[in-house]
Image: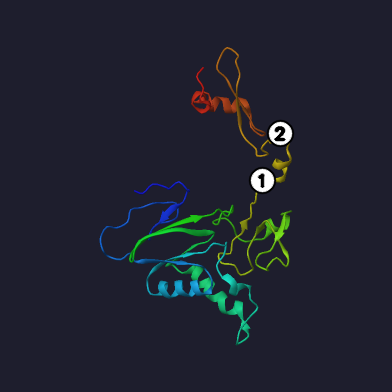
Amino acid sequence: MRSRNQTGTTPILPGQTPGKEMTMANDSKPVGAAMVVGGGIAGVQAALDMANSGVKVYLVEQSPAIGGKMAQLDKTFPTNDCAMCISSPKLVEAGRHPNIELLTNTDLVGLEGTAGHFRATVRKRPRYVDLEKCTACDDCVQVCPISLPNEFNEALDTRTAIYRPYAQAVPNKYAVTKRGTSPCKATCPAETSAQGFFRFVLLPVGTFDIKFEKEGYKPEVVEKVLYKNAQTILGLTV
């Protein structure tokens, strides 16, 4: 098994999911999978062509959705056809195709091997949104107080920090933009983190005791549950 490298990225091999590692086959038979880097209209069409031929395809896109520049256009030259009318069916087909695995918010950081036996290393950045639970209901956007330049519209308008790149985005899920340090933490003169936390307090009262401080919990109940394992949890010797 190949270990996770120092940059935190993980090799992605055909037939495996991100986050898992497996060894490369040693025989000379070509691996029956392909990787397409770039989820624009050309990359999507290439992925569809191979997927329809029975090839497993990993479609790597650095943004939260596939579509590329064509998704930003209104009309196409020279026919003046609607750009989204052309690309949207292909995007949906790629998103639903059983032989295509979309790797959005992902960068290709390394490629090694020979023809038929390449090993690709990708870095998958977090969306901060659970794709399995997100239904694109838009409720989160309505209450988000942060406005940022809208990259999809070339910064001609703004979007919220939690956003969907465009209305027909594939995958039809939201993502959160996180930049720098939160204002509340950056303003604090004591540099105190504003995140919530659990705190264990050891009280020297002659017998070993533990207090669990968290709003909504009763310390006496938690003590009964954690009493036997308190030394292990605290890492203390009493």
Q: Residue at x 61, y 18 (%)?
A: 203
**Is residue 189 found left or right of 35 in the rendered image?**
right
- Per the rendering, the mark at residue 181 is 1
Residue 167 occupies quadrant: bottom right
**Is residue 182 found left or right of 31 in the rendered image?**
right
Q: Residue at x 59, y 61 (%)?
A: 173
Residue 182 occupies quadrant: top right
**Marked residue nearer the N-terminal end (1 or 2):** 1
Q: Mark 2: which secondary structure? A: loop
Q: Amino acid at mark 1?
A: Thr
Q: Residue at x 65, y 39 (%)?
A: 195
Give above or below for 178 relative to 51.
above
| Tally of numbered tags | 2
Give above or below for 19 relative to 198.
below
Image marks 1 and 2: residues in contact by CB distance under 8 Å: no
How many C-alpha atoms fall within 10 Å of the one at disc 2: few (<14), some, or many (≥20)? Answer: few
Nearer to me, 210 or 70? 70
Residue 9: x and y in percent read 46, 51
Residue 186 appears in the rendering: yes
Q: Which residue is mark 2?
A: 190
Residue 30: x and y in percent read 30, 66
Residue 228 appears in the rendering: no
How many C-alpha atoms fall within 10 Å of the one at disc 1: few (<14), some, or many (≥20)? Answer: few
Q: Residue furthest top?
A: 206
Residue 139: x and y in percent read 69, 58
Residue 118 occupies quadrant: bottom left
Q: Amino acid at mark 2?
A: Ala
Give above or below for 181 relative to 206.
below
* Gap between marks 1 and 2 measured at Cα: 14 Å
Q: Residue furthest left?
A: 27
